[in-house]
Amino acid sequence: MARSVFGTDAAQPSADSSAPERKPLAKRKPIIKGGAASDKYIRAATQGGADRTYQEIPVDQIQDSRIRDRIDVNEDLDSLIDSIRENGQQIPILVRIVQGAEKTYEIVVGRRRLAATRRLGLPRIKAFVSKMDDREAFVAQGIENSARLETSYIERARAAAQGLEAGYEQKDIAEFLNVSRTLINFMVKSYQSLGEELVLAIGPARGVGRRNWDKLISEMGRHGISQKQALGLIDPESGDSVERFHALLKAVQSDRVRKAPSPAPAATRRDYLGGSVSTLRKPQQLVVKTSKAAPPDLLDQLGEQIDAMIAALEKKHKE
């Protein structure tokens, strides 16, 4: 049975629980101090929290968010799985109700907790259930990540591109990512220069800042290396994402990509008086061939006309 989150029921799980669920990561300055563990966060996410209830909901009724701000949700997931297995789920996830969808809920905050619960095979998960519009859910997701997660530069660039594609305004994306609005365009350009497939193959590369990503993009352009060619230089089984990034940058700088030879020009074939004639234009050549069945008249006429054509071209260029 659903209960109000902000009541005084002592048995109710609290968002203020301090029990750790995963290995802490370095954090940027949060938009709202305390993140998911703060009362300000809970109230900000739903404009006062009046519609929020605490429930245990079916895991199979939760759909993914459109904004995938983590490249790898399973990163360091084993420690979180062990924590939930030993201590139970300490902090509820946050979901919103979606109307007319195949599944009842959409995840807003807590994708790693949801992934860990799925891996454990648990049928239900503790959740705060709220009514949110798209913008409220988008901003709430960003608030959580600012307070609890050090997303990498390329993850934030990817989320910015997804946000614009989903129709969010630049000011909302800036709030979501806790970056200046002027930086959004640079981030989106970085992501688009690499493409989704290459970004996923490299991974989040935490600690690799904007300058290094810009350097990779610049080196790819300088050596004429396409996204597909760069993808072929990555060994997905080698090391972590930071090592993959630096290995790719080194490979690009050394111009290890073997350029494909330019395709040979194709001859043009035409039927000619019971036989055929083919012409092949090269930079400094024009090759004309006739089949044995074709009379030699064409070649004879071309030979006779060469002097006249040269004279006509010389006259044209002198005018």
Image (cartoon, grey):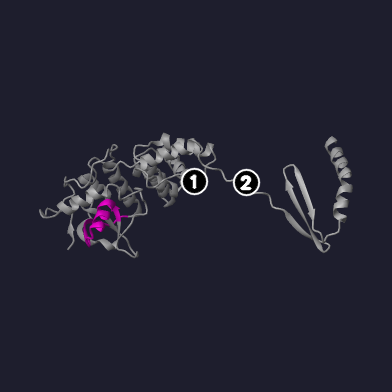
The C terminus appears in which quarter of the rendering?
top right
Residue at 23% over, 41% down: 24
Q: In the image, what residue type sits under mark 1? A: Gln
Query: Image quarter for residue 29?
Result: top left
Residue designated by label 2:
262
Boundaries of the magenta span: 107-132
Q: Position of residue 129 (x, y in %)?
A: 24, 57
The N terminus appears in which quarter of the rendering?
bottom left
Residue designated by label 1:
227
Judge from the rendering whether residue 28 lies leftward or rightward of residue 55; answer left or right.
Answer: right
Look at the image and tell me whether residue 235 can be seen: yes
Q: Position of residue 114 (x, y in %)?
A: 26, 55
Task: Please identify, in this view, whether the residue under mark 1 or under mark 2 is nearer the observer.
Answer: 2
Judge from the rendering whether residue 77 lies leftward or rightward of residue 170; answer left or right.
Answer: left
Residue at 26% over, 58% down: 118
Q: Position of residue 66 (x, y in %)?
A: 37, 54
Q: Is residue 271 above or below residue 206?
A: below
Q: Secondary structure at mark 1?
A: helix
Q: Earlier in the sequence, mark 1 or mark 2?
A: 1
> Is residue 213 on the magenta stretch?
no
> Is residue 117 on the magenta stretch?
yes
Residue 63 - label: none
Look at the image and tell me whether residue 47 can be seen: no
Q: In the image, what residue type sits under mark 2? A: Ser
Q: Secondary structure at mark 2?
A: loop
